[in-house]
Image (tube, helix red, strand yellow):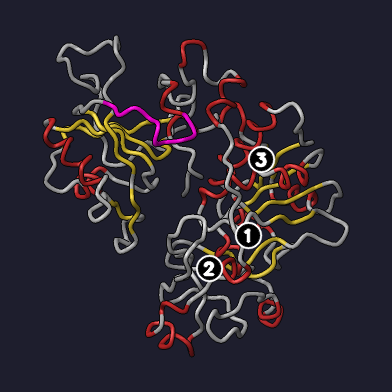
Amino acid sequence: LVGYGLENVKAPSLRRHAGKHLEAPDYHKQMQQKDTVIIDVRNAYESAIGHFQPPPHGATLLDPKMRTSQDFPKWLNAPSTKDQLKNKTVMMYCTGGIRCERATALLNQIQEAEDDFQTKDVVMVRGGIERYLKTFPQGGFWKGKNYLFDKRMEQVPSQKPTATLQADVDSTCCVCHTPHAQYRGQHKCAQLLPSSGLVCAVPVIVCDACQEVATQQPHSLECPLCKEGYQTPSTAPDLVGQKRKCGVIGTGGMDLVTGQKVQNHLFHHHTDSHPQQPPSTRLFCGKLPLTITASSLRQAFGDAKIDTIQWIVDHDTRAFYGSAFCHMATLEDAKQVVKESNNNNKVIQVPLTKKSKSKRKRIRVAYAPPPVGEKKDDTGRRPPVAYRETEYPPLGT
Protein backbone atom coordinates (compact mmCIF):
# COMPACT_ATOMS: atom_id res chain seq x y z
CA LEU A 1 0.00 0.00 0.00
CA VAL A 2 1.81 3.05 -1.26
CA GLY A 3 1.10 6.58 -2.40
CA TYR A 4 4.04 7.18 -4.81
CA GLY A 5 4.64 10.49 -3.02
CA LEU A 6 1.26 11.70 -4.33
CA GLU A 7 -0.19 12.80 -1.02
CA ASN A 8 -2.41 15.78 -0.40
CA VAL A 9 -3.17 17.96 -3.46
CA LYS A 10 -0.61 16.06 -5.54
CA ALA A 11 -2.96 13.07 -5.69
CA PRO A 12 -4.41 12.42 -9.17
CA SER A 13 -8.13 11.92 -9.60
CA LEU A 14 -8.87 8.19 -9.63
CA ARG A 15 -12.39 8.74 -10.93
CA ARG A 16 -11.23 10.84 -13.88
CA HIS A 17 -7.84 9.37 -14.72
CA ALA A 18 -7.58 5.77 -13.47
CA GLY A 19 -6.70 3.23 -16.18
CA LYS A 20 -8.97 0.54 -17.59
CA HIS A 21 -9.30 -2.80 -15.82
CA LEU A 22 -8.69 -5.95 -17.86
CA GLU A 23 -9.63 -9.38 -16.59
CA ALA A 24 -6.71 -11.81 -16.40
CA PRO A 25 -7.46 -13.60 -19.72
CA ASP A 26 -7.69 -10.29 -21.62
CA TYR A 27 -4.55 -9.01 -19.91
CA HIS A 28 -2.81 -12.24 -20.96
CA LYS A 29 -3.85 -11.67 -24.60
CA GLN A 30 -2.71 -8.05 -24.53
CA MET A 31 0.81 -9.13 -23.56
CA GLN A 32 1.02 -10.90 -26.91
CA GLN A 33 0.41 -7.71 -28.88
CA LYS A 34 2.98 -5.48 -30.55
CA ASP A 35 3.14 -1.75 -29.85
CA THR A 36 2.57 -2.58 -26.18
CA VAL A 37 4.71 -1.95 -23.10
CA ILE A 38 4.16 -3.48 -19.66
CA ILE A 39 5.35 -1.68 -16.52
CA ASP A 40 6.01 -3.29 -13.15
CA VAL A 41 4.92 -0.58 -10.70
CA ARG A 42 6.28 -2.42 -7.66
CA ASN A 43 9.63 -1.80 -5.95
CA ALA A 44 12.75 -3.21 -7.58
CA TYR A 45 13.34 -5.75 -4.81
CA GLU A 46 9.88 -7.20 -5.47
CA SER A 47 10.53 -7.42 -9.20
CA ALA A 48 13.86 -9.12 -8.59
CA ILE A 49 12.28 -12.43 -7.59
CA GLY A 50 9.44 -12.44 -10.10
CA HIS A 51 7.87 -10.52 -12.96
CA PHE A 52 5.87 -10.93 -16.14
CA GLN A 53 7.86 -12.14 -19.13
CA PRO A 54 5.87 -11.35 -22.30
CA PRO A 55 6.33 -13.70 -25.27
CA PRO A 56 8.72 -12.93 -28.14
CA HIS A 57 7.36 -10.27 -30.49
CA GLY A 58 4.85 -9.28 -27.83
CA ALA A 59 4.85 -6.51 -25.22
CA THR A 60 8.10 -4.91 -24.01
CA LEU A 61 8.71 -5.15 -20.26
CA LEU A 62 9.83 -1.92 -18.53
CA ASP A 63 11.26 -1.89 -15.00
CA PRO A 64 11.21 1.55 -13.28
CA LYS A 65 13.94 0.32 -10.88
CA MET A 66 12.28 1.91 -7.87
CA ARG A 67 14.12 1.89 -4.55
CA THR A 68 10.94 3.36 -3.05
CA SER A 69 7.56 4.14 -4.59
CA GLN A 70 8.37 7.86 -4.57
CA ASP A 71 10.81 7.23 -7.44
CA PHE A 72 7.95 6.36 -9.79
CA PRO A 73 6.73 9.90 -10.72
CA LYS A 74 10.32 10.92 -11.53
CA TRP A 75 10.88 7.84 -13.69
CA LEU A 76 7.57 8.38 -15.47
CA ASN A 77 8.46 12.05 -16.09
CA ALA A 78 11.83 11.24 -17.67
CA PRO A 79 11.98 11.98 -21.45
CA SER A 80 13.50 8.53 -22.09
CA THR A 81 10.50 6.88 -20.41
CA LYS A 82 7.96 8.95 -22.33
CA ASP A 83 9.69 8.03 -25.60
CA GLN A 84 9.10 4.35 -24.80
CA LEU A 85 5.42 4.94 -23.97
CA LYS A 86 4.39 7.22 -26.85
CA ASN A 87 1.70 5.77 -29.10
CA LYS A 88 1.80 2.45 -27.23
CA THR A 89 -0.74 0.54 -25.19
CA VAL A 90 0.64 0.82 -21.66
CA MET A 91 -0.03 -2.10 -19.31
CA MET A 92 0.69 -1.86 -15.58
CA TYR A 93 0.69 -4.47 -12.85
CA CYS A 94 1.31 -4.82 -9.12
CA THR A 95 0.62 -7.38 -6.37
CA GLY A 96 -3.12 -6.94 -5.93
CA GLY A 97 -4.03 -4.00 -8.17
CA ILE A 98 -4.13 -1.20 -5.58
CA ARG A 99 -0.93 0.51 -6.65
CA CYS A 100 -1.98 0.42 -10.31
CA GLU A 101 -5.02 2.56 -9.55
CA ARG A 102 -2.82 5.50 -8.64
CA ALA A 103 -0.01 4.73 -11.11
CA THR A 104 -2.35 4.60 -14.12
CA ALA A 105 -4.13 7.75 -12.94
CA LEU A 106 -0.81 9.57 -12.78
CA LEU A 107 0.12 8.53 -16.33
CA ASN A 108 -3.28 9.54 -17.71
CA GLN A 109 -3.04 12.90 -15.95
CA ILE A 110 0.41 13.55 -17.41
CA GLN A 111 -0.66 12.77 -20.98
CA GLU A 112 -3.82 14.89 -20.69
CA ALA A 113 -1.71 17.82 -19.50
CA GLU A 114 1.01 17.44 -22.15
CA ASP A 115 -0.02 17.92 -25.77
CA ASP A 116 3.09 16.23 -27.21
CA PHE A 117 2.80 13.03 -25.14
CA GLN A 118 0.05 10.53 -25.88
CA THR A 119 -0.35 6.78 -25.47
CA LYS A 120 -2.85 4.48 -27.18
CA ASP A 121 -4.37 3.21 -23.95
CA VAL A 122 -3.55 2.63 -20.27
CA VAL A 123 -4.70 -0.63 -18.69
CA MET A 124 -4.17 -2.74 -15.56
CA VAL A 125 -4.96 -6.32 -14.59
CA ARG A 126 -7.96 -6.56 -12.28
CA GLY A 127 -6.89 -8.15 -8.99
CA GLY A 128 -3.20 -7.82 -9.80
CA ILE A 129 -0.67 -10.63 -10.01
CA GLU A 130 -2.50 -12.63 -7.35
CA ARG A 131 -5.65 -13.03 -9.45
CA TYR A 132 -3.65 -13.63 -12.64
CA LEU A 133 -1.81 -16.57 -11.03
CA LYS A 134 -5.10 -18.03 -9.81
CA THR A 135 -6.50 -17.71 -13.34
CA PHE A 136 -3.36 -19.24 -14.86
CA PRO A 137 -2.26 -21.84 -12.28
CA GLN A 138 0.57 -23.02 -14.57
CA GLY A 139 1.98 -19.51 -14.63
CA GLY A 140 0.95 -18.07 -17.98
CA PHE A 141 3.52 -15.39 -18.81
CA TRP A 142 4.59 -15.06 -15.17
CA LYS A 143 8.19 -15.90 -14.27
CA GLY A 144 9.39 -16.48 -10.70
CA LYS A 145 7.67 -15.61 -7.42
CA ASN A 146 5.14 -12.95 -6.48
CA TYR A 147 6.50 -11.06 -3.45
CA LEU A 148 3.88 -10.73 -0.71
CA PHE A 149 3.77 -8.50 2.37
CA ASP A 150 1.95 -10.98 4.59
CA LYS A 151 3.12 -14.10 6.40
CA ARG A 152 3.09 -16.12 3.16
CA MET A 153 6.07 -14.04 1.94
CA GLU A 154 5.67 -15.15 -1.68
CA GLN A 155 3.22 -16.74 -4.11
CA VAL A 156 3.98 -19.12 -6.98
CA PRO A 157 1.75 -20.65 -9.69
CA SER A 158 0.08 -23.61 -8.00
CA GLN A 159 0.47 -26.02 -10.93
CA LYS A 160 3.88 -25.01 -12.23
CA PRO A 161 6.45 -27.83 -11.98
CA THR A 162 9.14 -27.44 -9.31
CA ALA A 163 11.95 -27.79 -11.85
CA THR A 164 10.49 -24.94 -13.92
CA LEU A 165 10.11 -22.76 -10.83
CA GLN A 166 13.77 -23.32 -9.98
CA ALA A 167 14.81 -22.51 -13.55
CA ASP A 168 12.86 -19.22 -13.30
CA VAL A 169 15.15 -17.87 -10.57
CA ASP A 170 17.17 -14.87 -11.87
CA SER A 171 17.96 -13.28 -8.49
CA THR A 172 21.05 -14.10 -6.44
CA CYS A 173 22.33 -13.89 -2.88
CA CYS A 174 24.08 -10.52 -2.47
CA VAL A 175 26.94 -12.19 -0.55
CA CYS A 176 27.88 -15.34 -2.49
CA HIS A 177 25.93 -14.55 -5.69
CA THR A 178 24.40 -18.01 -6.01
CA PRO A 179 20.81 -18.19 -7.33
CA HIS A 180 18.32 -17.50 -4.55
CA ALA A 181 14.83 -15.97 -4.41
CA GLN A 182 13.86 -15.58 -0.77
CA TYR A 183 14.08 -12.53 1.49
CA ARG A 184 14.94 -13.74 4.98
CA GLY A 185 16.63 -11.95 7.87
CA GLN A 186 15.54 -8.36 7.02
CA HIS A 187 18.94 -7.51 5.50
CA LYS A 188 19.28 -4.19 3.67
CA CYS A 189 21.68 -2.47 1.30
CA ALA A 190 24.23 -0.39 3.24
CA GLN A 191 25.54 1.71 0.35
CA LEU A 192 25.25 5.50 0.28
CA LEU A 193 23.27 7.16 -2.51
CA PRO A 194 25.36 9.90 -4.20
CA SER A 195 22.26 12.01 -4.86
CA SER A 196 21.25 12.31 -1.21
CA GLY A 197 24.08 10.93 0.91
CA LEU A 198 21.54 8.66 2.62
CA VAL A 199 21.80 4.90 3.03
CA CYS A 200 20.04 3.00 0.21
CA ALA A 201 18.29 0.57 2.63
CA VAL A 202 16.69 -1.53 -0.12
CA PRO A 203 16.02 -5.11 1.08
CA VAL A 204 18.61 -7.58 -0.21
CA ILE A 205 18.56 -11.35 -0.69
CA VAL A 206 20.81 -13.42 1.57
CA CYS A 207 20.84 -17.20 1.25
CA ASP A 208 20.73 -19.50 4.30
CA ALA A 209 24.47 -20.21 4.15
CA CYS A 210 25.37 -16.49 4.23
CA GLN A 211 23.03 -15.33 7.01
CA GLU A 212 25.77 -15.22 9.65
CA VAL A 213 28.20 -13.33 7.41
CA ALA A 214 25.51 -10.80 6.47
CA THR A 215 24.61 -10.26 10.13
CA GLN A 216 28.24 -9.76 11.16
CA GLN A 217 29.13 -7.52 8.20
CA PRO A 218 25.98 -5.53 7.37
CA HIS A 219 28.05 -2.62 5.99
CA SER A 220 29.16 -4.80 3.06
CA LEU A 221 25.66 -5.57 1.74
CA GLU A 222 24.83 -4.12 -1.67
CA CYS A 223 21.63 -4.28 -3.72
CA PRO A 224 21.61 -4.84 -7.51
CA LEU A 225 20.71 -1.18 -8.18
CA CYS A 226 23.72 0.13 -6.26
CA LYS A 227 25.95 -2.51 -7.81
CA GLU A 228 25.10 -1.25 -11.29
CA GLY A 229 25.34 2.38 -10.14
CA TYR A 230 21.73 3.19 -11.02
CA GLN A 231 20.49 6.64 -10.06
CA THR A 232 16.83 7.66 -10.05
CA PRO A 233 15.90 10.54 -12.43
CA SER A 234 15.94 13.77 -10.47
CA THR A 235 13.08 15.79 -11.97
CA ALA A 236 9.56 15.24 -10.68
CA PRO A 237 6.53 16.33 -12.72
CA ASP A 238 4.65 19.50 -11.79
CA LEU A 239 1.65 17.59 -10.49
CA VAL A 240 -0.26 20.59 -9.18
CA GLY A 241 0.30 22.49 -12.42
CA GLN A 242 -0.96 19.48 -14.39
CA LYS A 243 -4.09 19.27 -12.26
CA ARG A 244 -4.77 22.95 -12.91
CA LYS A 245 -4.40 22.42 -16.66
CA CYS A 246 -6.71 19.40 -16.55
CA GLY A 247 -9.31 21.34 -14.58
CA VAL A 248 -8.97 19.08 -11.53
CA ILE A 249 -8.02 22.18 -9.55
CA GLY A 250 -10.83 24.55 -10.35
CA THR A 251 -11.33 28.27 -10.18
CA GLY A 252 -10.48 29.69 -6.81
CA GLY A 253 -7.86 26.98 -6.28
CA MET A 254 -10.25 24.26 -5.05
CA ASP A 255 -8.79 20.77 -5.53
CA LEU A 256 -11.61 18.50 -6.69
CA VAL A 257 -9.80 15.36 -5.50
CA THR A 258 -9.22 16.30 -1.85
CA GLY A 259 -11.69 19.16 -1.47
CA GLN A 260 -8.86 21.37 -0.21
CA LYS A 261 -8.07 24.87 -1.37
CA VAL A 262 -4.63 25.11 -2.97
CA GLN A 263 -2.42 27.88 -1.69
CA ASN A 264 0.00 28.87 -4.43
CA HIS A 265 2.97 29.53 -2.18
CA LEU A 266 2.91 25.93 -0.92
CA PHE A 267 3.87 24.40 -4.23
CA HIS A 268 7.12 25.95 -5.41
CA HIS A 269 9.79 23.44 -6.36
CA HIS A 270 12.18 24.67 -3.69
CA THR A 271 10.80 23.85 -0.28
CA ASP A 272 13.26 26.20 1.44
CA SER A 273 11.34 29.14 -0.03
CA HIS A 274 8.04 28.14 1.56
CA PRO A 275 6.79 30.77 3.99
CA GLN A 276 6.48 29.35 7.49
CA GLN A 277 2.89 28.81 8.56
CA PRO A 278 2.02 30.42 11.89
CA PRO A 279 1.65 28.03 14.86
CA SER A 280 -1.80 26.55 15.22
CA THR A 281 -3.47 23.71 17.08
CA ARG A 282 -4.26 22.07 13.73
CA LEU A 283 -1.36 20.06 12.28
CA PHE A 284 -1.07 18.49 8.85
CA CYS A 285 0.40 14.97 8.89
CA GLY A 286 1.52 13.57 5.54
CA LYS A 287 3.28 10.48 4.20
CA LEU A 288 1.29 8.26 6.53
CA PRO A 289 1.18 4.54 5.66
CA LEU A 290 -2.25 3.45 4.47
CA THR A 291 -2.27 0.94 7.33
CA ILE A 292 -2.08 3.69 9.99
CA THR A 293 -4.49 3.69 12.91
CA ALA A 294 -5.56 6.47 15.25
CA SER A 295 -3.98 4.61 18.18
CA SER A 296 -0.57 4.24 16.52
CA LEU A 297 -0.57 7.91 15.46
CA ARG A 298 -1.33 9.01 19.02
CA GLN A 299 1.43 6.76 20.30
CA ALA A 300 3.89 8.31 17.84
CA PHE A 301 3.07 11.78 19.21
CA GLY A 302 4.10 10.68 22.70
CA ASP A 303 3.13 13.10 25.47
CA ALA A 304 1.61 15.61 23.04
CA LYS A 305 -2.16 15.14 23.28
CA ILE A 306 -4.26 14.86 20.13
CA ASP A 307 -7.83 16.03 20.58
CA THR A 308 -9.18 14.66 17.26
CA ILE A 309 -7.69 12.95 14.20
CA GLN A 310 -9.40 13.92 10.96
CA TRP A 311 -8.52 11.55 8.08
CA ILE A 312 -8.20 13.41 4.76
CA VAL A 313 -9.94 11.53 1.93
CA ASP A 314 -10.24 11.68 -1.85
CA HIS A 315 -13.07 14.02 -2.80
CA ASP A 316 -14.48 11.53 -5.34
CA THR A 317 -13.87 8.07 -3.85
CA ARG A 318 -13.84 9.10 -0.16
CA ALA A 319 -10.75 6.89 0.25
CA PHE A 320 -7.85 7.76 2.56
CA TYR A 321 -4.59 8.47 0.72
CA GLY A 322 -2.01 9.02 3.46
CA SER A 323 -2.74 12.41 5.05
CA ALA A 324 -4.61 13.66 8.12
CA PHE A 325 -5.30 16.75 10.20
CA CYS A 326 -4.43 16.33 13.87
CA HIS A 327 -6.31 18.76 16.07
CA MET A 328 -4.10 19.13 19.13
CA ALA A 329 -5.43 19.71 22.63
CA THR A 330 -3.30 22.83 23.14
CA LEU A 331 -0.96 25.06 21.16
CA GLU A 332 1.93 23.86 23.32
CA ASP A 333 1.19 20.26 22.29
CA ALA A 334 1.30 21.31 18.64
CA LYS A 335 4.59 23.17 19.07
CA GLN A 336 6.13 20.15 20.79
CA VAL A 337 5.27 17.84 17.90
CA VAL A 338 6.51 20.24 15.20
CA LYS A 339 9.73 20.81 17.11
CA GLU A 340 10.38 17.08 17.39
CA SER A 341 9.56 16.51 13.70
CA ASN A 342 12.20 19.08 12.75
CA ASN A 343 14.79 17.47 15.01
CA ASN A 344 16.79 14.85 13.10
CA ASN A 345 17.68 13.15 16.37
CA LYS A 346 14.03 12.69 17.36
CA VAL A 347 11.72 12.45 14.39
CA ILE A 348 8.07 11.47 14.42
CA GLN A 349 7.74 7.89 13.17
CA VAL A 350 4.87 5.43 12.86
CA PRO A 351 4.89 1.64 12.28
CA LEU A 352 4.40 0.57 8.66
CA THR A 353 2.12 -2.30 9.63
CA LYS A 354 0.23 -3.37 12.74
CA LYS A 355 2.16 -6.65 13.02
CA SER A 356 5.62 -5.37 12.08
CA LYS A 357 6.19 -2.56 14.58
CA SER A 358 9.97 -2.72 14.07
CA LYS A 359 9.57 -1.28 10.56
CA ARG A 360 8.86 2.41 10.93
CA LYS A 361 8.31 5.35 8.63
CA ARG A 362 9.08 9.02 9.15
CA ILE A 363 6.02 11.19 8.62
CA ARG A 364 5.70 14.83 7.62
CA VAL A 365 4.28 17.25 10.21
CA ALA A 366 3.52 20.93 9.70
CA TYR A 367 1.31 23.67 11.08
CA ALA A 368 -1.96 23.88 9.14
CA PRO A 369 -3.99 26.86 10.30
CA PRO A 370 -7.41 26.96 8.59
CA PRO A 371 -7.54 29.34 5.60
CA VAL A 372 -8.59 32.87 6.38
CA GLY A 373 -12.33 33.28 5.97
CA GLU A 374 -13.12 29.57 6.27
CA LYS A 375 -16.40 29.14 8.13
CA LYS A 376 -16.05 27.67 11.61
CA ASP A 377 -18.52 25.55 13.45
CA ASP A 378 -20.37 26.86 16.49
CA THR A 379 -17.50 26.00 18.84
CA GLY A 380 -14.89 27.85 16.79
CA ARG A 381 -12.94 24.55 16.56
CA ARG A 382 -12.34 22.05 13.77
CA PRO A 383 -13.30 19.48 12.60
CA PRO A 384 -17.06 20.16 12.49
CA VAL A 385 -19.21 18.95 15.37
CA ALA A 386 -20.73 16.23 13.18
CA TYR A 387 -17.32 14.65 12.52
CA ARG A 388 -16.63 11.39 14.37
CA GLU A 389 -13.10 10.07 14.57
CA THR A 390 -12.56 6.44 13.51
CA GLU A 391 -9.74 4.09 14.48
CA TYR A 392 -9.05 3.16 10.86
CA PRO A 393 -8.97 5.53 7.84
CA PRO A 394 -11.90 5.21 5.38
CA LEU A 395 -11.53 2.73 2.52
CA GLY A 396 -13.80 4.71 0.23
CA THR A 397 -16.33 3.43 -2.28
Badge 3 is on which residue?
Answer: 21
x, y percentage for residue 318?
Answer: 43, 29
Separation of residues labelled 3 and 2 (CA atoms): 24 Å
Q: Nearer the viewer, residue 43 or 338?
A: 338
Q: In x, y percent, where is residue 367?
A: 26, 31
Instruction: Please give the name of the residue rendered at 51% of the width and 55% of the height, measured from the top-left corner.
Output: 195
Span shown in magenta: 268-277
Above or below: residue 78 compared with residue 259: below
Front residue of 2 and 203: 203
What secondary structure prevails in the magenta region?
loop
Query: Residue 291, position in %: x, y?
Result: 37, 48
Q: Is residue 159 left or right of residue 285?
A: right
Q: Secondary structure at mark 2?
A: strand
Q: Residue at x 35, y 56 (%)?
A: 353
Q: Quadrant of residue 44?
A: bottom right
Q: Which residue is mark 1?
A: 134
Q: Nearer the viewer, residue 16 or 125?
A: 16
Q: Amino acid at mark 2?
A: Glu
| Mark in front: 1 vs 3 | 3
Membership of 20 in magenta stretch: no
Disc number lying in front (2 or 1)? 2
Residue at numbered disc 2: 154
> Which amino acid lies under the numbered mark 1 shown in the image of this protein?
Lys
- Give the answer, above or below, for where 320 lies relative to 185: above
Who comes first in sequence, dot 3 or dot 2?
3
- Which residue type does callout 3 highlight? His
| Residue 276 is inside the magenta segment | yes
- 321 versus 60 height, above or below: above
